[in-house]
């Protein structure tokens, strides 16, 4: 058994088995978030794709790659969104370098 | 993409149509609906499988080597039917219908009889020998032109329709614009069709239409009237693609899960009848490609067509029908919801 199964994505609703009330609340909120609003569905799908990569969640990556296609984005746009996520992750790691510097400087002459 | 090394023994009847765990009729019934036709307003004519292109998603399996095309005699029967039954619209498709020797007579005679004529024009055919004046011909007869352009970028378009097709399509669109097609509020309608370049559903029609309008204008100086989104049907070449790439089950599940009861009322089979290159009748062009004729109790050919028998008729369905009810629905005129 693999920890990640592709078919599990389509079984997500099974998470409503034991506390359906909580799952329904989650789904209502989740689906409302996807709707066209001040941001378009397509922009939201690109944000979802970027976050999915930052989280490195394979289900989310699969789901949002499809959502991006089905909301009209192309691979250039999707790749730019992924670079945004990667750049932030890289930047977030790099800025913590100052903590290392601070730590070293604190005990250094 | 490589084919399986060993060819399995297959039952052709089982494999020539898409498979679905859920029946279409049952899903329609479960939604409390009955699928019945209304009055037939549109006669959709598929004049044959000959085409100058061989697109990877083509549900007709059309191409340059296909020889099945409508005879002059059958084309004359179509014109006779248009005159006798007063179809509001004649929707001509193929293959590339312009390559049929009877095409121009069919258009001119049907227009003279007062029918609105739509031609599903693949754009590149106007660069074939003897077809250079197609834009002027379309304009002279007030034809509505509907053309596939799966994306506003070359990579996606060429991946689906063939190397170099995008550049030729742009040139053809410019020619159509030059003779007056595609201007806002103009009488010469140039409508585009978006098909997903792969095993996924189309985006919302209004949203992708706005993208196309902006991108085609700013990048290439091209204008058009409307963009229709059409879902890829799991038939012939697209079904082969789904199977070759291991996507059939996932795609069919996607179509079934996206079933939208609100799309049923607007299904094109409710207002059109489809005729093939031999004159046989079908509920739609997709059924035609699966050899699913109209219900056996009905007249089977265009020569025998009777509007009273067809109004309110039952529709022959199969798993591919989920393609027309997924999401915002899909028809030859785009989304239906």
Image (cartoon, rainbow, N blue to C red):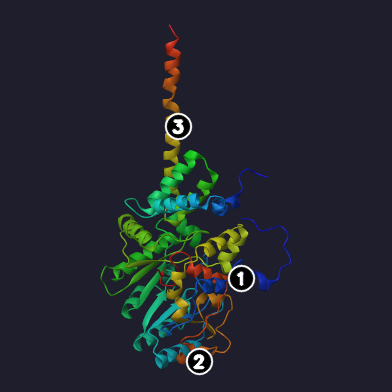
**Looking at the rendering, in which quadrant would you find the C terminus of chain B?**
bottom left
Q: Which residue lies under the disc numbered 1? A: B17
Distance from disc 2 to disc 3, alpha carbons, whole Å, reads: 70 Å
Q: Secondary structure at mark 3?
A: helix
Residue neighbourhood size for the residue with mark 3, other residues' Cα within 10 Å, grouped as few (<14), some (14–19), many (≥20): few
- Quarter where residue B194 is shown: bottom left
- Distance from Cα at disc 1 to Cα at disc 3: 49 Å
Dot 1 surroundings within 10 Å: few (below 14), some, or many (20 or more)? some
Q: Residues within 10 Å of mark 2 (few under 14, many from 20)?
A: some
Task: Provide the residue designation for mark 2.
Answer: B303
Estimate the x, y position of residue B164 in percent, counting from the top left.
Answer: 46, 59
- CA distance separating discs 1 and 2: 28 Å
Seen from the viewer's position, the closer of residues B233 and B236 is B233
Mark 1 or 2, which is nearer the eye? 1
SS at badge 2: helix
**In this view, B235 is above or below A15:** below
Residue drawn at (73%, 60%), measured in percent from left and top?
Answer: B6
Any part of residue B61 in sight? no
Residue B223 shown left or right of residue A44 in the figure: left
Q: Is residue A11 above or below residue B118?
A: above
Q: Which residue is mark 3?
A: A90
Which residue ends up furthest to the top in the rendered image? Answer: A109
Decide: is B132 above or below B114: above
Nearer-N-terminus badge (1/2): 1
In the orientation shown, which residue stands out farthest toward the left?
B185
Instruction: Name the subunit of mark 3.
Output: A
> Is A26 rendered above or below residue B132?
above
Secondary element under disc 1, as helix, strand or loop, is: loop
Chain letter of the residue beneath label 1 in the structure image: B
Residue A75, image x and y in percent? 45, 49
């Amino acid at each position: 058994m693999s920890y990640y199964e592709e078919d599990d994505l389509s079984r997500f609703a099974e998470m409503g088995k034991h506390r359906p009330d909580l799952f329904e609340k989650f789904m209502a909120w989740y689906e409302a978030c996807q709707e066209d609003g001040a941001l378009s569905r397509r922009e939201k799908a690109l944000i979802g794709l970027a976050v999915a990569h930052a989280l490195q969640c394979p289900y989310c990556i699969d789901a949002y790659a499809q959502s991006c296609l089905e909301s009209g984005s192309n691979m250039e746009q999707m790749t730019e969104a992924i670079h945004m996520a990667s750049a932030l992750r890289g930047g977030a790691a790099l800025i913590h370098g100052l903590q290392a510097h601070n730590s070293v400087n604190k005990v250094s002459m | 993409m490589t084919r399986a090394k060993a060819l399995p023994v297959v039952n052709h009847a089982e494999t020539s149509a898409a498979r679905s765990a859920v029946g279409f009729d049952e899903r329609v019934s479960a939604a409390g609906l009955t699928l019945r036709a209304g009055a037939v307003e549109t006669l959709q004519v598929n004049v044959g499988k000959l085409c100058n292109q061989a697109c990877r998603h083509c549900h007709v399996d059309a191409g340059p080597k296909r020889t099945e095309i409508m005879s002059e005699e059958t084309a004359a029967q179509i014109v006779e039917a248009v005159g006798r039954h007063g179809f509001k619209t004649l929707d001509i498709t193929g293959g590339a219908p312009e390559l049929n020797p009877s095409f121009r007579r069919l258009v001119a005679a049907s227009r003279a009889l007062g029918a609105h004529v739509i031609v599903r024009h693949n754009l590149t055919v106007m660069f074939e020998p003897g077809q250079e004046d197609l834009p002027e011909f379309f304009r002279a007869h007030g034809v509505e032109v509907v053309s596939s352009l799966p994306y506003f970028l070359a990579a996606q378009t060429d991946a689906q329709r063939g190397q170099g097709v995008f550049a030729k399509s742009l040139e053809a669109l410019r020619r159509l614009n030059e003779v007056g097609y595609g201007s806002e509020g103009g009488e010469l309608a140039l409508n585009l069709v978006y098909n997903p370049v792969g095993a996924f559903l189309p985006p919302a029609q209004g949203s992708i239409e706005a993208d196309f309008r902006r991108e085609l204008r700013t990048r290439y100086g091209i204008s058009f009237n409307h963009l229709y989104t059409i879902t890829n049907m799991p038939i012939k070449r697209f079904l082969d693609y789904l199977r070759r790439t291991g996507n059939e089950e996932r795609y069919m599940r996607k179509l079934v899960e996206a079933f939208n009861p609100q799309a049923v009322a607007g299904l094109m089979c409710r207002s059109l009848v489809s005729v093939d290159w031999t004159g046989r009748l079908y509920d739609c062009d997709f059924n035609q490609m699966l050899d699913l004729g109209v219900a056996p109790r009905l007249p089977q050919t265009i020569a025998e067509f009777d509007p009273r028998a067809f109004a309110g008729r039952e529709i022959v369905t199969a798993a591919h029908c989920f393609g027309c009810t997924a999401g915002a629905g899909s028809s030859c005129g785009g989304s239906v919801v």
